Image (spheres, helix red, strand yellow):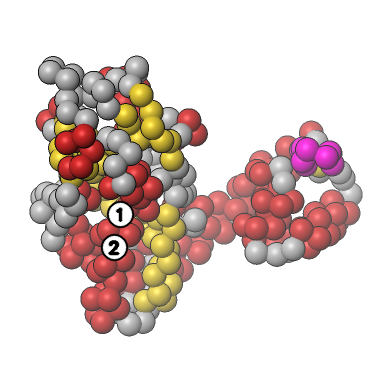
Amino acid sequence: MDWNDLRYFLGVARSGSLTQTSADLRVSQSTVSRRISEFEASLGMTLFVRHQTGYFLTDEGREVLKHAERVEDSILALERGAAGLDRTPTGDVRLATSENLATDLIIPAIPAFRERYPGICLEIITSTVTAELSRREADIALRVVRPMHGNLKIRRVGHMTYSVYGSREYIEKHPAVEGEPMGGRHFITWDESHAHLPAAAWLAREHPGCRIALATTSLPTQIAAVRAGLGLAVIPDFLAINDDFIRVVPSDQMFSNEVWLLTHADLIASARIRAVSDFLADQVVKTNPELAGRWTEA
């Protein structure tokens, strides 16, 4: 049996979509459809019910899925083990992080990193959806939420505080109501699909009746909206220090997050993984006074 057959099967089984699987595997939809049909023919059973709304596993398909995931786990463990055997810092490294950490911390430091490690090609994945290190969706992750499971090497590399900010012009045009920093002011926040994020949860909990001027799906757009004078927003303090922003609610009345650097335990012996991890911890986070903190391992 071809391992690639299992990759196509797992992709469709998990997403229920030829379109999504073709995008994930970077092949055409017709290729995915053909490989699924060939896989079914080789097993002599129907694995999916085809419907206009998607592909749905049959009873036989669900049973095959259990076996396919065990095979996948073994192959991924083999790949991680092989990746951990390299002794020279060369090759590709996939880093998963948030957009604001990528644009404001990591990317400005990449020229210095490239001078030190020209043989490493860094690929940055930015999303509010957590990449799974165990599935090799990324090799390293820089996150503000510590995972509760997984065979991971975890390092605390910093501490991120948040405050509510507005532009100087907006604050001057909309003076605070005594005892009510949000009174008479509008807010910029996350859309409903991101209501689980700490900033959105804080606003819903502490100021459920505030007036919303704009809802977005990214922190950079919120910062741009504050800069344009649309209202107030919850912004990490390290992102606001170079802007003409006024702090409306200080960080000691807000929430904070630790910054965690994660690698899969099977990859900690890899020279290229160590190079990227150490650079992120020592040169990127620690050099920023708003994030610096003595890191620990767990």
Expressed as whole percent of the image width and height from the top left, the position of residue 61 reads 77, 40
Left or right position of 27 against 212: right
Q: What is the three-letter code of the residue carrying label 1? A: Leu
Residue at 38% over, 48% down: 221
Inspect the image, locate mark 2, and give the three-letter code of the amino acid beneath it.
Ile
In the picture, the quarter occupied by the C terminus is top left
Q: Given contact means CB atoms under 8 Å apart, are the residues at marks 2 and 1 in contact?
A: yes
Residue occupying the point 13% across, 61% down: 287
* The magenta segment: 49-57
Q: How many marks?
A: 2
Among the 4 quarters of the image, the one containing residue 87? bottom left
Name the residue tied to disc 1.
101
Q: Earlier in the sequence, mark 2 or mark 1?
A: 1
Camera-side residue of 261 and 171 = 171
Q: Quadrant of residue 159?
A: top left
| Res 217 visible | yes
Q: For the point 62% across and 57% down, which residue is it?
A: 24
Count neighbours of disc 2 (C-alpha within 10 A) and say few if under 14, some if 14 to 19, many if 20 or more: many
User: Residue 244, how many percent across, how many down?
Assistant: 17, 49
Query: Which residue is the site of mark 2?
Result: 106
Note whether 121 is above or below 289 in the view shown: below
Q: Point out residue 190 in the picture as x, y percentages from the top left corner.
A: 40, 35
Element type where label 2 sits in the image? helix
Q: Nearer the viewer, residue 204 or 245?
A: 245
Residue 85 falls left or right of residue 65: left
Which quarter of the figure has residue 171?
A: top left
Say whether residue 265 is visible: no
Q: Residue at x 77, y 41 (%)?
A: 54
Whether residue 223 appears in magenta in the rendering, the answer is no
